[in-house]
Image: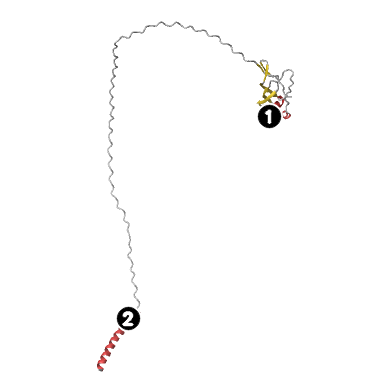
Amino acid sequence: MRSGWRQQAGILCLVLGCHLAALALTLADSNEPAPEPEVVTPPTIVGIMLPPPVAPPQPKPKPLPEPKPQPKQKPKPLPKPLPKPLPKAPPSEKAVSAPPVEPPPPPVRKAKAAPAKAAPAAPTIQPPSAEAQGLNNKAPLYPQLSRKKKEQGTVLLLILVKADGTVGEIKLKTSSGFTRLDQAAKQAVKRWQFQPALKEGQPIDFWYELPLKFRLNQG
């Protein structure tokens, strides 16, 4: 019995020793530093630029031969048209007799024109007058300011002289160039008395042109 127990104890010790030895190896391997990983450098790719292939020179094209000028063809003359024959007159069956000649008519005597009657003479009109006897028409006053400024000129008035000799209307036909002289002429003539115009001895209304001069005496 004791020898069997001893054998089992020896086997057990052997197994424990193997386990301890394996554990020791494992611990020893774990304490060593891990080896550094190897760095693999990728290969460098270097490109080389090759010159483009030179194309062989192409042969020059041969010039085309110039076309020869073709001779111009002259136009052929057109044939002249033949004249058409004139149509023949149909033969007359009967001869045409000439018409009888009539004697010329007797000449017509022209009647003498009666002498034209003279147109009645237009009735004469005697124009009015501002200088007849018995009239006392005063000349226009020369404005003092016009004298100082030496204003001179002629005023032409168009006056309606009525049948009774009074002045009905006054219009300025031509100015003297100065308003003061024009107004002075109108104011004076407005009070004038005229001998009226006469038509066949009868007084009538009449438009009459009257010039009035303004002149300074040069002394």
Locate the C terminus by quadrant.
Answer: top right
Q: Nearer the viewer, residue 37 or 113?
A: 113
Q: What amino acid does circle 2 point to?
A: Thr
> Mark 1 to mark 2: distance in Å?
148 Å
Q: Is residue 205 left or right of residue 110?
A: right
Q: Is residue 118 above or below residue 165?
A: above
Q: What amino acid does circle 1 point to?
A: Thr
**Identity of the residue drawn at 28% across and 88% down:** 12
Q: Nearer the viewer, mark 1 or mark 2?
A: 1
Q: Is residue 10 left or right of residue 110?
A: left
* Residue 8 visible to the viewer: yes
> Element under label 2?
helix
Locate the N terminus by quadrant.
Answer: bottom left
- The spot of residue 120 in percent (x, y) is 60, 13
Residue corresponding to mark 1? 179
Q: Is residue 100 left or right of residue 85?
A: right
**Identity of the residue drawn at 34% across and 79% down:** 30
